[in-house]
Amino acid sequence: MTAPDPTGHPPLRIAPLRAVVAPVRFATARGDDADPALDELRRAVADVRLEVFVDEQDVPLALEIDARDFAATTIHVLACGADGAPLGAARLLLEPDHPGQVHLGRLAVRRPARRTGLGARLVAAVEQAALRYASVEGTVTVVLAAQETAMGFYRRCGYRVVTGERYLDAGIWHQDMARTLTRS
């Protein structure tokens, strides 16, 4: 599967799953949605993020779960295996003050699902959701704060470094990256 990139970068190639049994199901929920049926989805998203960021990377809980998680401008994305087990999660932040721009964050894949192509599929699912918020010109720029250890992954997904400035976030070195998508 490939996704066109209007910036002239090579198309995104999403590797087939090796260890994760297909199909993978993706589900979304807005941060402020009061539908009780979505509570389970939001709990599963939080469980994945807590396992990866708090337990594995020692990110303080107070920094991992924040007010944006419950905002109307937040979309949570959950990837589950065929058996319904949560495998990965991500957060898409809409930027009302910056039309045509969204923020991809909190991308987390549980250890058993890493290096299977699931992360790239999760990015692609977030990008599909992001395209719903494209500008009137039909483009949306997805920005993210990449942990430096994950920058190669994001490059393979078509993202490029914005400024090259390094900064610490929760004690982990990051750099900003972005990719512009066009609605077809």
Image (spheres, helix red, strand yellow):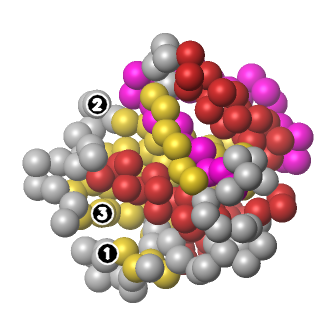
Looking at the rendered image, the disc whose residue lies closer to the viewer, 3 or 2, is 3
Q: Place residue 50 in its image quadrant.
A: top right
Q: Is residue 77 left or right of residue 82?
A: left
Mark 2 crowdedness (10 Å alpha carbons): few <14, some 14-19, many ≥20: few
User: N-terminal of the two: label 1 or label 2?
Assistant: 1
Q: Which residue does the image show at 80% across and 46% down from the upper left? A: 52
Provide the residue span drawn in magenta. 53-81
Which residue in the structure is indicated by mark 1?
5
Q: What secondary structure is found at the residue carrying circle 2? A: loop
Q: Which residue does the image show at 25% across and 74% down from the upper left? A: 6
Which residue in the structure is indicated by mark 2?
96
| x and y, in percent, of residue 99 in the image | 23, 40
Q: Say what amino acid the circle numbered 2 marks.
A: Pro
Asked if residue 85 is positioned above or below residue 125 in the image, the reply reads above
User: N-terminal of the two: label 3 or label 1?
Assistant: 1
Mark 3 crowdedness (10 Å alpha carbons): few <14, some 14-19, many ≥20: many
